[in-house]
Image (spheres, grey):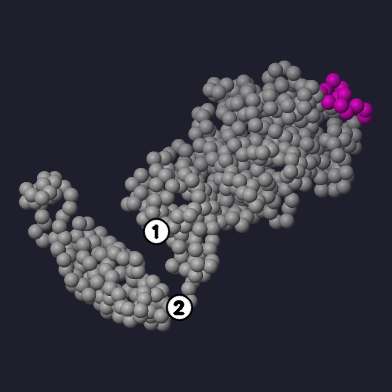
Amino acid sequence: MKKIARYILMAAACLVMWQCGPDNPDNPDNPDDPPVNPDPEIHIIGSSEFDFNEDGGKCSFTFTSATDWTATPDDGWLHVNQTAGSGSEFEIDIDLTCDANLGEEPRTGTVTIAAGPLEEKITVTQAERIPEGPKSSECVLTALNFVPSVNPTLSSQLSYSPRNIRGYDIIFVTFPDGADMTSMIPHFEVSKKATVYVGEEKIVNGKTPVDFTKNEPWTVVAEDGEHSMTYMMMARRGIPAIDRKIYSFLGTYSIPAVGLAVTRNGQIVYAAGYGLADAGNDPVFCTETHLFRLASVSKTLTSICILRLCQEGRLSLDDKVFAPGGPLADMFPGTHASRVDDIKVRDLLTHRSGWTNSNIGDDPIFPYTSRFASIRTLKERVATVVKNNSPAYTPGTTYSYSNLGFCVLGLVIEQVTGKGYETYLREVTAMAGANDIWVSKNARNQKRDNECVFYAQDGAYPYDNDMTISAACGGITASAMDMARILNAIDYGTNPPDILEPEWLDKMYTNYTSSYPGGYGFGWWIGHGTLTNWATYHTGSLSGTATLWVRGKNGVSGVILCNSRNYKSSFDTDMYLALDNAMTRILE
């Protein structure tokens, strides 16, 4: 490799006194100092001469009577990395890296090698001028570390790496309770000879305290001064073991934002928003109160509304929905296809109406053929099926997941209450203190102020579904906080009071099918084959949406909401594990 400069290291021993301690009668100038150590010398047994190249140089020295050695520079033109050892005699390697141009004249600097209160200064002399070469254009930050030695409010080291989310480079950082976020000293790993700024302030690696409550941008400026890279800072207080899993999930699957909430014994014990609710030109940080589309998690809320009507005696699980005297008989008069009039409310709640997408020839709610896509209202789509499509199976016997069935239940709610689906839904969820739940709008420019923007992947489009048609099966929007409040109101608890009485909760959480590991109840999957602490759960999936909520067996429940969906095979598993990790860590 090209030789840049030759350095000669000369060593000389020096005497260093002990510092700090109780009364010292041997030191009248400072009686609080400890007695002078009679032999505190650090003995350097060898010295070395070596050449610098583009990667710096390395020298070795053998020391005696030392433990926990460190090496630091005494001036601004020499950088030292160190390794440590212990014992009565050991060898330490010091890596030396010089700056690009030290000037015309030879210069001398020092490196301090210390062991506890002992230290030795090694003199380093420049032997020849270093010619100025091309300056680096690299300006990348690869890691941010926080060590307890310079951050006494930390009990262990924290390490984070930037993530790229839809073109934004973001540094996600979580500090534990008790950490002083207003004055944390970071150690960062950046391109060689790059300079780091937080806001407008230049910061020195491992020395400059930073106020992380401000979330100011970080800018890395290359040595050449012409190239730079800016990073968003998203620092928060929380549980690092929970948040690291979320940060990894965001970065791995290009999810702009996640809402997370965990409850325990009827109380919300952890809630956060991560990433960007809007990743456009004017990005918006996500919070725990941002609204996400729930997709099929909406089915569970529809079930709760239906069971509330049953609890009030306004509806029966055994009501035949379309038959004379049934809740929708007047809405769909005339002749029906065979077996349609045998469909009961309980059959729709458990996906056992007997209808299947294959026997209908399409999904009437999310159509993939022109047969239903051209029909603009839910009522007309249901009427088409009722008149023309007999259930493929005897109602009440065979599970077949059905968006249509839950949208029919939405019409039942409207017919029984005389109110719009959204109006009655909001009345029921308000019993849990969840007051920011809505039916989603169809277009991005119609979204609510605190609603996320939804981002599709793999060429899909997130705003191509009619949410007014799919409302009861997949069209609701809510925040992680409000979904957690609802979990607390369907948990057999009394604080807050439950929306449903225990009898109706029992019915909702009962397995009525043999599909999936534990089967399907009224709007819930029952149990999970691998995550055995899950009592019930439901997922949701739309273009631009992925959701999951879980009622745990141990008093801990949770919800995770995403404003995008990735189509890698591992995505759903990792989303499950991210939420399960949060539910598990909250117990530690």
Residue that sits furthest to the top in the current view: 313
Tell me, yes or no, if residue 73 can be seen here: yes
Q: Is residue 48 above or below residue 572?
A: below
Left/right placement of residue 433 relative to residue 385 reads left
Left/right placement of residue 317 relative to residue 386 reads left
Q: Position of residue 564 (x, y in %)?
A: 65, 48
Amino acid type at circle 2 is Gly
Q: Position of residue 478 (x, y in %)?
A: 65, 36
Q: Disc 2 versus disc 1: distance between alpha carbons? A: 24 Å
- State the extent of the magenta-drawn residues as a range: 323-335
Q: Is residue 145 above or below residue 127?
A: above
Q: Quadrant of the C terminus?
A: top left
Count residues near mark 2 (Cα–Cα under 10 Å), then give few for <14, some for 14-19, many for 20+: few
Q: Which residue is mark 2?
A: 133
Amino acid type at circle 1 is Asn
Q: Position of residue 317 (x, y in %)?
A: 73, 24
Give the quarter of the image for residue 38: bottom left
- Residue occupying the point 46% across, 65% down: 194
Q: Which one is in front, 185 or 398?
A: 185
Q: Position of residue 509 (x, y in %)?
A: 63, 30
- Residue occupying the point 16% across, 60% down: 16
- Residue occupying the point 45% across, 63% down: 195
Q: Is residue 471 above or below residue 17?
A: above
Disc ID at residue 269? none
Q: Which residue is mark 1?
A: 205
Secondary structure, magenta segment, majority class:
loop
